[in-house]
Amino acid sequence: MRVSTQLFFRQFNSSLEIQQSNIAKLQQQIASGRRLLTPSDDPAGASRALDMTQAISRLDQFNNNAVFAEQRLGLEEATLDSHTNLLQRVKELAIAAGNLGAQSADTFTAIRSELEQRLQEVLNIANTRDGNGEYLFAGFQGDVQPFVLNGGAVSYNGDQGQQMLQVGANKLVATSDSGYEVFQAIRNGNGTFSVNLNSANSGNGVIAAGSIVDSTVYQLHDFTIQFTSATTYDVINNTTAATIITGATYTDGQPITFNGIQTSISGAPQTGDEFFVQTSRSQDIFTTLQNFIAAVSVYPADTAGQARSQQAIQSVIADLDQSLGKVLEIRTSVGARLNSIDSTSDENEAVKIEFQRALSDIQDLDYAEAISALELQLSTLEATQQSFIALQRQSLFDFIR
């Protein structure tokens, strides 16, 4: 076959360009450390690398979410710890106030002054903001102040939502608790029922908190223990308007049992005195504190007044115990969520390492192999150039003898 000089030059230039392109690509791979420079280098590998990169980005976002969630829950835990300490101090005051023999009008005034400050502290805790300026206990309404004191009553302006963040592929975690759940949804009394007396009572009887003794017969009904004389009483079911016990004999401090519950009354009730046993209702912590303030507003001047004060303070102590129990319940939940975040973050990190290893296998360069290939390409290029020079120097006259 006849090869023209022009064809020879074109073939040489084409070969030279290919080899130079290969060398340039190898140099670029070595400089970047990447085997895949463009998707065309390995379409299937590039597709897998893109999937791996996106998966790693998602894990990074999950970990960022986890950091934010830990910060927010850490703030909530610290806030609830302060709230617990405050409630414990208020309970100490209630126990002290309940010892009427050691109190006076002056000590009642001092206790009331401290309680008014404690009420403001609880309000400040309930309106805590996070690092972004959002209210921690407002539910989904992070930009709305949740608790407002207006005319002596505290109102809640948030909602019952919990803000959520995704910290794992299949893991959502609540980063907050609503103010309703923490400060309002608290059952009063012993959590099942509450006791109280009629403020119009003329005797000095006080009813004990009581407890459930037979849950199988307990009903969510309200009752009145009504004294028909100083030594006898009836028990009336207010829910059904039926008298369930008639003319029972009263003995100071002895158990009174009905509806699966047991309580007792101490002191000397008078004819017409009434004591109430009601199903527990939700009562916010602000109402409990305000009830305490009311109980120590006036030092009792007579035995009936002392009974009312004693009863009110006992109710406050029971309600404070319920509030402390609610805070402990929320703190336990917060701790569980923090532990869950830690576990999920560890899992994310382990998966991320595997994805990074797989991505490296797909796109990272084997330097030894690349350098060997570059040296081979350089040798080939040099041989090609030398052969072209040698062939270029040949002439037809060299073959004429």
Image (cartoon, rainbow, N blue to C red):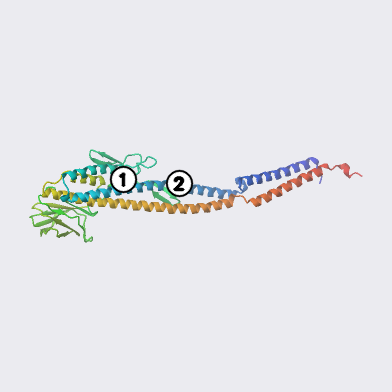
Image coordinates of residue 269 in percent, x first then y, are 10, 53
Residues 188 and 141: in front is 188
The residue depicted at 26 percent of the width and 39 percent of the height is: 149
Left or right: 227 with respect to 154? left
Label 2 Cα neighbours within 10 Å, binned few <14 / some 14-19 / many ≥20: some
Q: Earlier in the sequence, mark 2 or mark 1?
A: 2
Whether residue 238 appears in this view of the structure is no
Amino acid type at mark 2: Asn
Image coordinates of residue 110 in percent, x first then y, are 21, 43
Disc 2 target residue: 64
Left or right: 367 with respect to 97? right
Q: What element carries label 2?
A: helix
Disc 1 target residue: 179
Query: Residues under labels 2 and 1: Cα distance?
Result: 26 Å
Image coordinates of residue 70 in percent, x first then y, are 41, 48
Q: Is mark 1 on a helix, strand or loop?
A: helix
Whether residue 322 appears in this view of the structure is yes
State the quadrant of the C terminus: top right
Q: Total number of numbered labels?
A: 2
The residue depicted at 76 percent of the width and 44 percent of the height is: 385
Amino acid type at mark 1: Gly
Q: In which quarter of the image is residue 135?
A: top left
Left or right: 202 with respect to 6? left
Residues 41 and 334: in front is 334
Image coordinates of residue 161 in percent, x first then y, are 34, 46
